[in-house]
Image: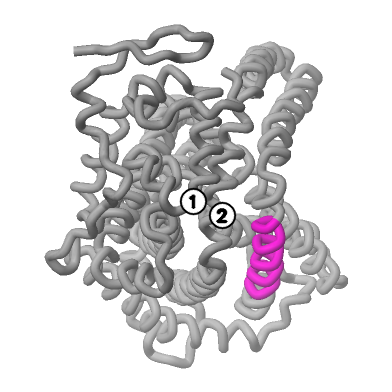
Amino acid sequence: MDQPLLGSGGAARLIDVQKIETLPNANEKPQIEGGGWKDRGFAIAFWIHVLCVVIIGLVLGIPAIRYDTNETFDDSTRKPLDFDASLFLRIFMLASGVGGFASVFFFFVLQRCAGQLIKCSLYTGLFMQIVFAAVMFKFAWGFGIFMLLFIFLTIWYIYYVRNRIPFAEAHIKTGCAALARHPSVYFVALGMLIVQCLWVFFWSMLALGFEHAINDYPRNSTLYDNVSKEGSKSGGGIFVFVLLVSLYWGSITFKTVVHFVSACVVGDWWFTNSDHIVRSSVNRAFTTNFGSLAFGSLIVAVIKSLRTIAQNAQNNAQRQGNIVVTLITCCAACILQILERVIGFLNEWAFIFCALTGASFIQASKDVVELFKRRGWTLIINDDLTGNALAITSLAVGFISAAIGGITVYTVMPHNPSRIEIAGIGAFFCFLIGLAMSTIMTSILTSCVRTVFVCFALNPSALASTHPEHLSELVTAWYRFHPQEFAQSGYAYHLPKPPSTEV
C-alpha cells in the first residue's frame, strides 16, 4: 500500500507504507555479533605466511646482502638491471621516507580541499587525454581519432557530475568530523604505514635471496650449493605467482586494517559517540575480525597476481611478435582487471559491514548488498566522486617519490655510463613505494565517506541524537541531489526537507 509524500514544489511522491513501518528507530544501532573469531582459518594461515616470509627473508636475504655489499654500486661495468643490495636498500629507505612524508601532507590537504581536488582530478584527467590525443595524431592519427571519442565522453561525464560535487563534499565533511573526534586514527594509519614498510622490506629480502639462489651466484655458504637451477626454471611460473600473492596479500591486508578501524570509528561516532573506540577497534581488527579481513584480501591478492602475470605474458608475446598469444593474454588481463576492481569494490563495503556488525566476511557481503537493494541506492554507491580526488593524490605522492628517488640515484652514480637507465629504474621503484604508502593514508578518507553512506542507509535518524548538525547537512544534500531515491527509501517520511533546502 502506498501513500503520497509531498516533495519539491508540492509534487506528490508515492511511498510504500510497509517500508516506512520497517524503518529503524532513532535509538537503534547495529549490534556486534559474538561467537568468537570470524573466519579464523584465514587469520591463522596469514600469520603463518608472514612468519615464513620473515624467517626465510632473513635466512636468504642477509647472505645476499653481505655478498652484494662487497661490490661498489658505482661501477662502470655494471649494467642497468644489475642491482646490488646496497643500492637497493638506499632506494628503499629514500622512497619510504619521501612517500610517507608526502602521504601525511596530502592527507591534511584532502580534508580541507576535497571539493577542489575532485574538480582538479576531473580536469586533470581531461587534460592528460587531450595531450595524449595530440601525440597520437602526430605519430598514429588513427589512435588520435579514437582518443577523441574518450575526450568527448569525459567532457560529457564532467558536465553530468559537476553539480554533484557538493554531495561528495557533504559526506567527506561528515567523515572528517568523525576523525576529528578520534584523531588517534591517524597514528593507527602511521603505524600501519610502518608495518607495510617492514612487510615490503622483509618480502624484498626474501625475493632478493631467492633471486641470488636461482641465478646461482657464488657463495661461501653451502646453502646455495643445493639449489637446482633447472628445477627453479621449471617451477618459475608457480614460484613467481606465489611470491606475488604473498606480497599483495600482506599489503592489502594491512591496508584493510586501517579501513576497518576507520569504519569502526565513524560507526561509533554516528550511533553512540563513545570514548576509547580506537583501541577496541584495533583489538577487533587483529583478533575477532582479522580472519575476515585476511579472507577478503586473499581473494583480491590472487586476482591481482594473475593479472600481473597475464600482463607480463602479454608484454613478452608482443616483443616476440606472437599475435595469437598477445590477443589471448590481453583479453585475460582485461577480464582480470575488471574482476579485480569489482571484487575490491565489493570488499570495501563488506569490510565496513564487518566493522559495524562484527559479521563474517561472507555474511557481511550478503548483508551490505541486501541493504542497498532494500534502500534502492545501488546506482548511487557506484557514482562516488571521492575516488577521483584520492586517486590523483596517490599519483601525486608516487610522482614526487619517483622524481626525488630518480634524481638522487642519478646524482650518486657519476662514473656509471648506465646511470640514466639505473636512475629510471630507481624512479619507477620509488613511484611504486610512494604509491603504496599513499594508499594507506588516503584509504582513511575513503573508509570514512563510505562508512557515512552505510550508516546513513542503516539509520540516519541515529545521528540526530549524537550530531544533529551533520544530519541536517546530509539530509540537505540528499534532498538536493538524490530526492527521488531518498523518498523511495522511506526516510523522507521521518526526515522532512530542511526549510533552507532548494531542490
Depth check, front residue: 62 or 159: 159
Locate residue 282: give its quadrant. Answer: bottom left
Task: Give above or below for 105 relative to 223.
Answer: above
Q: Which residue is mark 1?
A: 467
Q: Is residue 360 above or below residue 72?
A: above
**Does 95 appear in magenta?**
yes
The amino acid at mark 1 is His
Q: Residue lying farthest top?
A: 11
Between 413 and 416, the one nearer to me in the picture: 413
- Residue 464 % position (x, y): 43, 46
Residue 2 in the image: x percent, y percent? 24, 12
User: Residue 133 has which mark?
Assistant: none
Residue type indicated by callout 2: Ala
Identify the residue at image location x=16%, y=64%: 34
Is 175 a magenta residue? no
How far across and how far down the image is residue 411, in percent?
85, 69
Give above or below for 157 relative to 98: above
Numbered disc 1: secondary structure: loop
Residue beneath the point at 41% across and 50% down: 465
What's the magenta region? Answer: 92-108
* Residue under pointer 2: 177
Q: Residue at x 68, y 83 (%)?
A: 71
Badges 1 and 2: C-beta atoms under 8 Å apart?
Answer: yes
